[in-house]
Image (tube, rainbow, N blue to C red):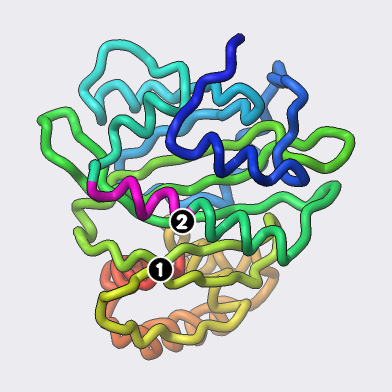
Amino acid sequence: MKKQQHLLSNLWESYPDAISNQYSVPEKVPIGRFLTELLAIGPFYYYVINIVDNSLHHIHENLLCLHGTKTYPSTVKQIIDYIHPDDLNFVFEAEKATLLKMEKMGFGKDILYRTSYCFRMKSADGSYHLFHHQGIHLSQDQEGRFTTALNIHTDISHITTINNHIVLVNAVGDRNYCQLDLSVGLPELNLPKLSKREMEVLRLLTQGLSSQQIADKLFISPLTVRAHRKNLLKKTTCSNSGCLIKKCIEFGLI
């Protein structure tokens, strides 16, 4: 397939140590392995990018109804066409910032990254909704360069319409995270400092798990989970889990 150009093509190609030039579409994409890394607290869809030629595969059917289209997109450019024109520059800068950060953190075999940030996308009724974008690398070539990535887009307009232009980057399986504040010209945010364990609890809360279920997954007691939940509410000045999730999206913590 001929390589399709789009807004991010030249940027991605400027990182040859990160992006593979070997065409590869795995027959079985291990999406399930990474679903626990992702946030989906609203209508969502996902798709897999073959980074070498920017083609799309394994597209979730929800894309059709959320964007009001009858045909599945086949390239990254067609996804970018759904993004609000005023948000395109931010998307470019967000991708650039994540590549710079990942370069500093290190590229290499078995080092996969997850990134997330928000932007507006055109919905089925023609209006623009705020979507939470998450990207997570699925596979690498023999040199450790990325070959495929899973993207998930979640409509979060029912939760918040505020985009504070914060990008989150972390290595898959590592709860240490890095926030990149791209909110130039916007009011400075007083971001709460969450511990590694609090971030783990927060991630599981977004999946709708109870304190007992979170305790089972983290091998800690329910009392300890409730203590972490209490600390999360206090640090974010929230009174309930719904408010907590809303604020943490706005803060770029998830």
Q: Nearer the viewer, residue 89 or 51?
A: 89
Whether residue 58 appears in this view of the structure is no
Q: Which residue is mark 2?
A: 94
SS for dot 1: loop
User: Mark 2, residues whose alpha carbon is within 10 Å: few (<14), some, or many (≥20)?
Assistant: many
The correct choice, above or below, for 22 with respect to 15 in the image is above
Whether residue 206 appears in this view of the structure is yes
Q: Are marks 2 and 1 in contact (CB under 8 Å)?
A: yes
Q: Which of marks 1 and 2 precedes in the sequence?
A: 2
Q: Which residue is mark 1?
A: 182
Relative to 181, 104 lies left or right: right
Q: Is residue 88 magenta?
A: yes
Magenta residues span: 86-94
Relative to 189, 180 lies left or right: right
**What amino acid type is highlighted by mark number 1?**
Leu
Tell me which residue sits at (77%, 24%) in the image.
22
User: Mark 1, residues whose alpha carbon is within 10 Å: few (<14), some, or many (≥20)?
Assistant: some
Tell me which residue sits at (55%, 38%) in the image.
10
Relative to 211, 173 lies left or right: right
Residue 138 in the image: x percent, y percent? 68, 38
